[in-house]
Amino acid sequence: MDINEFLAEWHNDSPTVLVHTSGSTGKPKPMLVEKRRMEASARMTCDFLGLHEGDTALLCMSLDYIAGKMMVVRALTCGLQLIVQEPSGKPELPSLEEGLGVGFCAMVPLQVWNLLHEAEGRERLKQVRHLIIGGGAIDEALERELQDFPNAVWSTYGMTETLSHIAMRRLNSPSRSDYYTPLPGVTLSQNKDGCLVIDAPAVHEGKLVTNDIVEFYPPSPLGEKTGMRLFKILGRKDNVICSGGIKIQTEEVERLLRPHLSKPYIITRAKDEKFGEVVVLMVEGEETDELMNICRQVLPKYWVPRRIVTVDRLPMTETGKPARAEAERLAADYPSR
């Protein structure tokens, strides 16, 4: 979809817009969302960041998904001056010297990584007044590279159902945090499984129970009463591997391995007669003894993968997230050794 197609859909008589989920845990699903709720989401973001009419915003993401659509809606709703680019892995950022800096931009981690590893791209990225990063996990190394940025860099939390993000956390400056701050009008709680429950009436009808296991801060009665606690994502409920009675969070295993593995990898699982499920390391390239040695050195005993599956390319979604369901299928079909 290009910008003119989306604008035609936005300005037609229908009160809804068609969007698709990202497909990170299965096939992408179509959804009809209300335009009035998209406008409410746009105002929440602009108010939180202090964006004003006339500020510049860069669209460099695909309009096939909610993140790209919401950049356009923010511009239309809040009077931002939108700069439109063809989506690419390395956006071309205008510079202040050219007379048109970027006040606000949304990117996925891959786009940020590509720009950081090019001198001119890095300098232009530093000029963005508010850079928000979403659509995938932010690597600790990537977060470290953003620490010296003079302007605000944010990680976002949200999903298609919440019309992009409902919370942000600062990645740089003394204000950086490991915890997300909910946007105004968003109330949070947990269910019995420790999963986040979102109550954001402006953007979603009724409470939305997620599969994201969270830790709240502060864990106080006042926080429970107001629902305004900050939160940290520990992982997804459906990414818990139950191996021999031990519950292992996929994302936590990936986090511990990240500083030690240079090859692209995903942690997934496979059925096992003895343990019920076992941890599987899926990696691009060839299997080596070094891979298993690293796992034994840096992981708790019961988290060490029982199998290593090698692939030419890791299964990923179009938005750059691990395609967990496909990885699990590949692991199940891989011959045991």
Image (cartoon, rainbow, N blue to C red):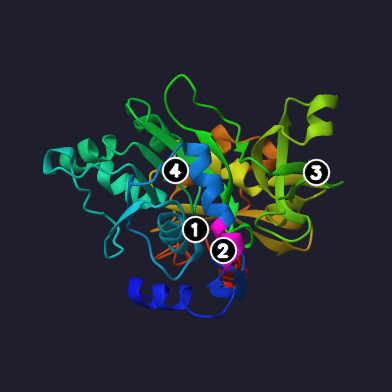
Image quadrant for the N terminus?
bottom left
The image position of residue 182, as x and y in percent, is 63, 39
* Mark 3 burial class by Cα count in 10 Å: few <14, some 14-19, many 20+: some
* Mark 1 burial class by Cα count in 10 Å: few <14, some 14-19, many 20+: some
- Give the mark, 1 or 4, whose residue is nearer the N terminus: 4
Where does the magenta region start and end?
35-39
Establish if 304 lies above or below 69.
above
User: Dominant secondary structure of the magenta stretch?
Assistant: helix
**Mark 4 to mark 2 CA distance (whole Å):** 30 Å
The reply to whether callout 1 and callout 4 are in contact (CB within 8 Å) is: no
- Taking the view exactly as shown, the residue that stands out farthest to the top is 174
Task: Kindly identify which numbered label has been placed on residue 190.
Answer: 3
The image position of residue 95, as x and y in percent, is 18, 42
Q: Residue at x 38, y 44 (%)?
A: 262
Q: Which residue is mark 1?
A: 321
Name the residue nearer the viewer: 76 or 194: 76
Q: Quadrant of residue 260?
A: top left
- Give the mark, 4 or 2, whose residue is nearer the N terminus: 2
Image quadrant for the C terminus?
bottom right
Q: Quadrant of residue 125?
A: top left
- Give the mark, 4 or 3, whose residue is nearer the N terminus: 3
